Amino acid sequence: MPILLTNEDVKRLITPEIAVEVMKETYRSIAGGTAVTRTRSQTFAETSREGVFVELRTMDGIVPSLSAVGMRILPDLHSWPKVGENLRYDKIPKKNGRFLAFDLIFDLDTADLQAVIQDAYLQQMRIAGAHGVAAEYLARRDASRVGVIGSGWLARGVLSGISVVRSLRSIKVFSPTAANRVEFAKDAERELNVKATAVETPESAVQDVDIIVVCTNTIDPVFFGKWLSPSVHLDSISGRDIDDESFRRSDYTVLSMREGKCNEGLNFFPRLLRDKLAARFSPFTRPIRWETYPELGEVIIGKARGRNREDEITFFCNNVGFGAQFAALGGKAVALAKERGMGKPFSIDEWYEEVR
């Protein structure tokens, strides 16, 4: 029977160290041509609530070396509020004040459903793994000081992944809400055993550091190329909140996957909504030559280089998520759960059909 794995289950099963190794194999397999993936599809429509849109996001992938087959499904409500000078991309909770997102994991040889997994912690560890691998190849070996713009759930994931591959000594964090950045700093000190400080401006966060992490919900730039200095490694969770000058000033930029451009996915919405939503998707039409940059998987297999000078500015742009990441981590979680007798079994025998 398939099993249900909760976020708490996944937290016990998948450590940042495991996430880094699984993501490294995932990127390696895609670049080597043995794995397959789809970047996310985003299907939009307008709801009866003014300014609120329903979005169905899906992505899937198969990584045979990890016996991983999976699909991620996110039915969300979204709005684009303006906070200060920046347009944000915000999720709206369901009526019960909670969110719904899950991953389906299938057996590689039989195609039977193996598990349904709550998505939040798997998402955080997917981020931890990808950004940890990127820092391993692109950040200086002695990088130990990190500046963070953003104080959310995923920023915590980025730091946990980087801490696997680099010995961190200090963290500075900025976000517009003082209470959030203070709480983030306290949690980082406790969880990563480093000195962490909340600062009052984004410029303060990114001065005199070795690694810069930009992880926000905005679709307007909050990080600017003029803040880059020699030898720094810039790490962006989406690329949407990084200005075009950062791409020009970076000596060496690596993408998660060229196909996704800038968190574009395959966006579908009714024809009458195209004009209304056009401004929200303006980052996707940026004058950036995405096809000229190498992918992280190509760096791992040696098709593209990693950092080769101490003084060069490197930039990992996690420009798009893709299904193989969730298939691989979900498959690993299921394998470990079976070894440890974890997960709640449930039956879907009545779902099987005689015709197709």
Image (cartoon, rainbow, N blue to C red):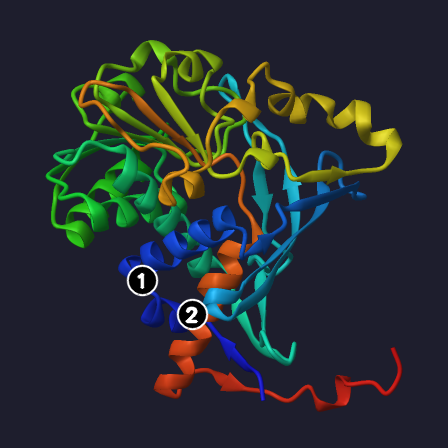
Residue 125 seen: no
The quadrant the N terminus occupies is bottom right
Image position of 168 with respect to 111: above or below: above
Residue 152 in picture, x, y percent from top left = 38, 42
* Circle 2: element type: helix
Relative side of 343 to 164, left or right = right
Q: How far apart are the two marked residues, 1 and 2, measured between alpha carbons?
A: 9 Å
For mark 1, what is the residue? 18
Tag shown at residue 249 = none
* Residue at screen point 39% across, 88% down: 341
The quadrant the C terminus occupies is bottom right
Q: Residues within 10 Å of mark 2 (few under 14, many from 20)?
A: many
Residue 263 in picture, x, y percent from top left = 57, 35
* Residue at screen point 51% across, 58% down: 326
Image mark count:
2
Residue 298 seen: yes
Relative side of 239 to 200, left or right = right
Report the front residue among 206 and 337: 337
Report the front residue among 154 and 329: 329
Q: Residues within 10 Å of mark 1 (few under 14, many from 20)?
A: some
* Residue at screen point 29% across, 49% down: 161
- Tag 1 and tag 2, C-beta contact below 8 Å: yes
For mark 2, what is the residue? 332
Residue 259 in picture, x, y percent from top left = 60, 36
Image position of 188 with respect to 228: above or below: below
Q: Amino acid at mark 2?
A: Lys
* Residue at screen point 75% across, 35% down: 50
Report the front residue among 323 and 346: 323
* Circle 1: element type: helix
Q: Quadrant of residue 215?
A: top left
